[in-house]
Amino acid sequence: MYAFTSDDVAFLRSAAGAAALAEVDALPFSDASRLHDVGVARKLLGPSSAPVVETVLLRRRAAAKLDSAGSWLFTDDALQQATASAIARHRAARFAGRDVHDVTCSIGADLHALSAVAARCVGSDLDPVRLAMARNNVPGQLVVRADALRPVSRGTAVTADPARRDSSGRRKWHPADFVPPLDSLAEVYADVDLAVKCAPGIDFAVAPWADEIEVVSLDGAVREACLWTRGLATAGVSRRASVLSGSGSWTLTDAEPDDCPVAAPGEWIVDPDGAVVRAGLVRHYAARHGLWQLDERIAYLSGSTPPPGIRAFRVLEHGHYAEKALRALLKTRGVGRLEILVRGLDVDPNTLRKRLKLSGPGDATVVLTRVGSRPVFLLCQAERT
């Protein structure tokens, strides 16, 4: 991992740096050619080759995550923590028309989205290299060096994305170890409308000061939890799941009904999006779509008609789960390719798949779960609704 300096950033932003980036970007850097291409870059650029090559490679990695990656500057760590553009736009929408201060702006991924909707916005950070990169990435926006825990703006809503990795790249799991610490942010900005981006696995109990917790997924992967306070939170809502995708987005909150019966499996099994599960809104999702639970402690749902636009599972057979009986059933049906989904049982899908000794031309999905104290299987066919 290359450690960028302020001089590197100044070179990359210069006309000579732009020319060097364009020249090196013409190289393929495939697995087969990478060593050769690095050598070519060294011959062309000498000591300047390292930041140029690293930037070209980072831009290629960022292309699927950030809209303007082709002209941006990054460090490896900053790119890893940068908010995907689709999520940044979604979050920025709550700040529309407001004056906003991003107090941990890093390379400017969130600041870029805010600049499109906020009345005015400012970004700040302590890292001079990342600040220089932010000035390149979000031109025309005020970017200053400041400690997030020492406010330098007034009358603004505040957004923060505390660092959750140490200097060696290892994840920090305890909110007190975030930089800045989560409770410190909440204390300093107790009288300000605040939004804090966190990892989706955060224990919600550590943020009793959050008026609304929103869990966001993008294209099926749960990506973040955002803690909203005061005027940024939605009245009457304490939990929200926002499901974003290229084919459409939707949201679900705990203000909706959660009347959801528990019953035997129907024609379909539905595995709700991870944001719904993480936000604790499985019953609300079921009520919205006329589904029911197999067990009140398990997130799998069932129904006669699955929601549109999802991957659902048409039930072929179901019953008591025993490995030997399942192996015999799969053999009878000629299942050679099997997707194994598990909730509520101590079963490792990869280990089980080997023991099932699959053979045959068919494919199927088996859902293994618990109903009460009884382990059950549901043999299904996956379909896109």
Image (cartoon, rainbow, N blue to C red):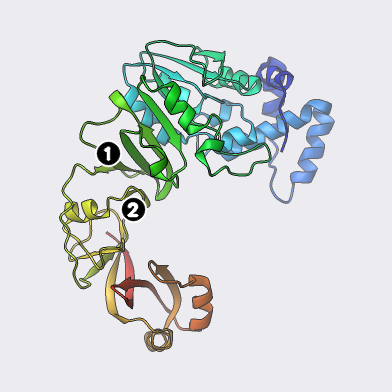
Circle 2 sits on which residue?
277
Q: Which mark is residue 127?
A: none
341 or 344: which is nearer to us?
344
Query: 180 above or below 151?
Result: below
Is 246 on the left-hand or right-hand side of 235? right
* Callout 1 secondary element: loop
Residue 112 visible, this orientation: no
Is 54 on the left-hand or right-hand side of 353? right
Label 1 sits on what residue type?
A: Ser
Q: Position of residue 139 (x, y in %)?
A: 52, 15
Q: Which quarter of the image is occupied by the C terminus?
A: bottom left
Q: Position of residue 72 (x, y in %)?
A: 58, 26
Query: 228 above or below 270?
Result: above
Q: Residue at x 67, y 27 (%)?
A: 22
Q: Quadrant of residue 75?
A: top right
Q: Which mark is residue 238?
A: 1
Q: Quadrant of residue 61?
A: top right
Is 310 on the left-hand or right-hand side of 39? left
* Callout 2 secondary element: helix
300 or 180: which is nearer to us?
180
Structural crowding at the residue carrying mark 2, measured as other residues with C-alpha within 10 Å and reported as few (<14), some (14–19) or many (≥20): some
Residue 177 visible, this orientation: yes
Query: 278 above or below 303?
Result: above
Q: Position of residue 3 (x, y in %)?
A: 72, 31
Q: Residue at x 20, y 35 (%)?
A: 236
Q: Quadrant of residue 319?
A: bottom left
Q: Residue at x 41, y 21 (%)?
A: 189
Q: Residue at x 20, y 73 (%)?
A: 264
Is 153 on the left-hand or right-hand side of 129? left
- Between circles 1 and 2, the one closer to the viewer is 1
Label whose residue precedes the other's in the sequence (1 or 2): 1
How far, Cα to Cα, is label 1 from label 2?
A: 15 Å
